[in-house]
Amino acid sequence: MLITIKYFGQIAEVTQKNEEQIETSASHISELLDALNQKYKELKNKDFQIAQNQELVATETKLSGAEIALLPPFSGG
Amino acid sequence: MLITIKYFGQIAEVTQKNEEQIETSASHISELLDALNQKYKELKNKDFQIAQNQELVATETKLSGAEIALLPPFSGG
Amino acid sequence: MTIKKPKNVFIEGPISSDFIGNSIYKHQTKTSIGAHNIFLGQVRSDDIDGKKVAAIEYTAYEDMANQTFHNIREAAFEKFDLTCMHIYHSLGVVKAGEICLFVFVSSPRRKAVFEALEFIVEAIKADAPVFGKEIFEDASHQWKVNN
Amino acid sequence: MTIKKPKNVFIEGPISSDFIGNSIYKHQTKTSIGAHNIFLGQVRSDDIDGKKVAAIEYTAYEDMANQTFHNIREAAFEKFDLTCMHIYHSLGVVKAGEICLFVFVSSPRRKAVFEALEFIVEAIKADAPVFGKEIFEDASHQWKVNN
């Protein structure tokens, strides 16, 4: 499955990009995260939430979305 | 004692004036009020508070002030 | 502590949106501020027994009211961590849709402004000797009562 | 009930005092309104380990954030008796002293605006995927965290 992953704020500083497309066979968010932690070693030191198709989800959630986002702590306003 | 009495809002509508000076021998606010109730019959149907030298006072208070005001319900803002 | 003389909070006629915008602008040099909270009282065109309110005419016991506003101001600075506070109230005729009360508080943090603004507005409504005469479209009137 | 498409709440750069004044002006035709309450978030020049914040650069997950703002808006209209509500948030660089958040609620009565405004501002801070990078005067930076 081809998915788009978006990175924001200090997560984008770690990945050095705002967005990428990856081909994955992961069935759950947690598996996808394992792959990303492999790719970006600094990621495990960072605090973030995950959105799937613009909804916050837990890592046990099934990977179903075309768009995954890694969101550091919100600091609007 | 010569005192200035100020009237506001609907009280001024009853007295038909905003201010007057009266000579009184009243020793307490209540006595002064009796005199005003005599002079302005409609006054007893009205709801108001009394300020003496710009401080709200009870009718049992001693008349000491040079400036008495009859204040209908506040409706600022 | 220095004793401050009460300021005059009264403005003749309605408070304009330009005046409010300009007041906001003037606070942009105060870079310790993180949060502003503004209350605006606007004259409502209430419908009472088939008659519409066209305007409110405000009068006040001005000296006493300015002292009351001063006391409210001092109490708010005492209770809350505020950087600035401004209060303006109209006198005279303010038409429906126009603004008659402008309260502006600023603080490093938002918690303080929420608490302070409500405290100040409620105190003004309860304690300031200001009197509003609601003038209907047919020129008759009634005296406003705060709830 | 019709389904409303999320509006775009984002503005490029700071929110000007003219924009705010003009927004207030536009509400003067709505004569059922008795009370407005406005929250403004202003960039604070915090001093952190001897370095001063010169600006905050905002980014957002825009589509998700607009949906979040939309949901907050719907929830507020559901909970409180509001006539109007407007939310604007900056993107990009906002310098210390400039305004980055403008929330404006209006109602016939003041109780509703006090409750609604605090609800909305707290929900924005907690739920909107917006990210602030605090840029110091020496061009170094740190990521802002809401409290």
Image (cartoon, coloured by chain):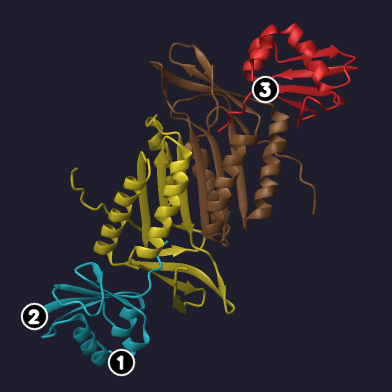
Chain colours: A red, B cyan, C yellow, D brown
Front: mark 1 or 3: 3
Whether label 1 touches label 3, CB < 8 Å: no
Query: What quarter of the picture does the N terminus of chain B occupy?
Result: bottom left
In screen coordinates, is D66 left or right of C78? Answer: right
Packing grade of label 2 (10 A; few <14, some 14-19, many >=20) is few
Q: Which residue is mark 3?
A: A48
Chain where mark 1 sits: B
- Foreground: A77 or A61? A61
> SS of the residue at dot 3?
loop
> SS of the residue at dot 1?
helix
The amino acid sitting under disc 3 is Phe
Q: Determine the residue located farthest toward the left in the rendered image.
A: B1
Q: Dividing the picture into quarters, in which one does residue A55 lie?
A: top right
Residue D73, how many percent across, how many down?
Answer: 67, 46
- Foreground: C16 or C10? C10
Q: Dividing the picture into quarters, in which one does residue A46 lie?
A: top right
For the residues beneath circles 3 and 2, the answer to whether they share a chain is no
